[in-house]
Amino acid sequence: MTTRTNTDTAPRAWIGCLACYNNARLVGEWFDAETAYEVTLADVHGGAHRVRPGCEELWVMDHENIPTSGEMSPSEAAEWARVLLAVPEHQREALCAWTASGSYVAEGTGDLPSVPDFEERFCGTWGSFRDYAETLAEEIGLIPKDAPEELARYFNWDAWTRDLEHDYTVVRADAISVYVFRDL
C-alpha cells in the first residue's frame, strides 16, 4: 500500500462495491474522480473473476478535494471533478471555499458551482478584507491623488470597509489570508 501525501488539489474518489459494503466488507480502491464514471466492478474487485454474485452497484464512499460531504454516485464524483478541473489548480481551494460558504451560484440540476460565476466573483486572496478594500479604493479613485490631505485624513476607512463588506463574501483561506468574492 502506498502512502498518499495530499499536496495537490486533484479530486479523488474511493469507489467501492455497495453489496460488499452492506455485508461488512470493504472492497474498493481510490480513483481519479474525473474518470469515476468509467470504473467497473472488476476494477474495484481486482479482476472480473473476483466479482461475487450479487455485486451490481458501485458507490463513492469517500473522496478528497471535493467540496461536499457524504457519499455520492461515481457519476456525481466525475461531475464535481469536471467543475474543479475547469479552474486553474491555484484557484481550486478558493472554489471549494466559495462552495462551502453557501454563497455560491449553482448550475444545472445539481449543487455544482458555476465556474463562470466563480470567475466573475472571485476577487483574489488577500491578507484581510481591509487590504482588498484599500486596493479597490485606489483603483476606482475613491480619493483622487490630487485631493487635499485634509480630505484624505478625515475619510473613515473603518466605516467604508465595514459597509463595503456587505457586498462580498469573505472566507478564511488560511491563518493569514482570506478569499474575497463579490456578491452580485
Image (cartoon, rainbow, N blue to C red):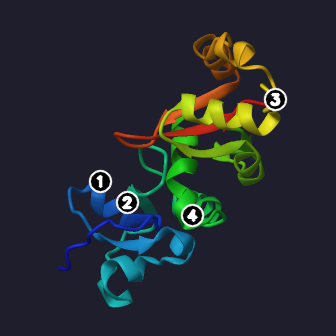
Of the numbered discs in the image, which one, if any, rests on residue 81? 4
Looking at the rendered structure, the kind of residue marked 4 is: Ala
- Local crowd size for mark 4, using a 10 Å CA cut-off: few (<14), some (14–19), many (≥20): many
Looking at the rendered structure, the kind of residue marked 3 is: Pro
Say how many tags the image has: 4
Q: Are marks 2 and 1 in contact (CB under 8 Å)?
A: yes
Q: Nearer the viewer, mark 3 or mark 1?
A: 3
Q: Nearer the viewer, mark 3 or mark 2?
A: 3
40 left or right of 121? left
Looking at the rendered structure, the kind of residue marked 2 is: Leu
- Local crowd size for mark 1, using a 10 Å CA cut-off: few (<14), some (14–19), many (≥20): few
120 left or right of 21? right
15 left or right of 36? left
- Secondary structure beneath dot 2 equals helix
Q: Give me the residue at 79% from left, 31% from top.
A: 184
Of the numbered discs in the image, which one, if any, rests on residue 144? 3
- In 3D space, how far apart are the residues under numbered discs 2 and 1 (Cα atoms)? 6 Å
Residue under numbered circle 2: 18
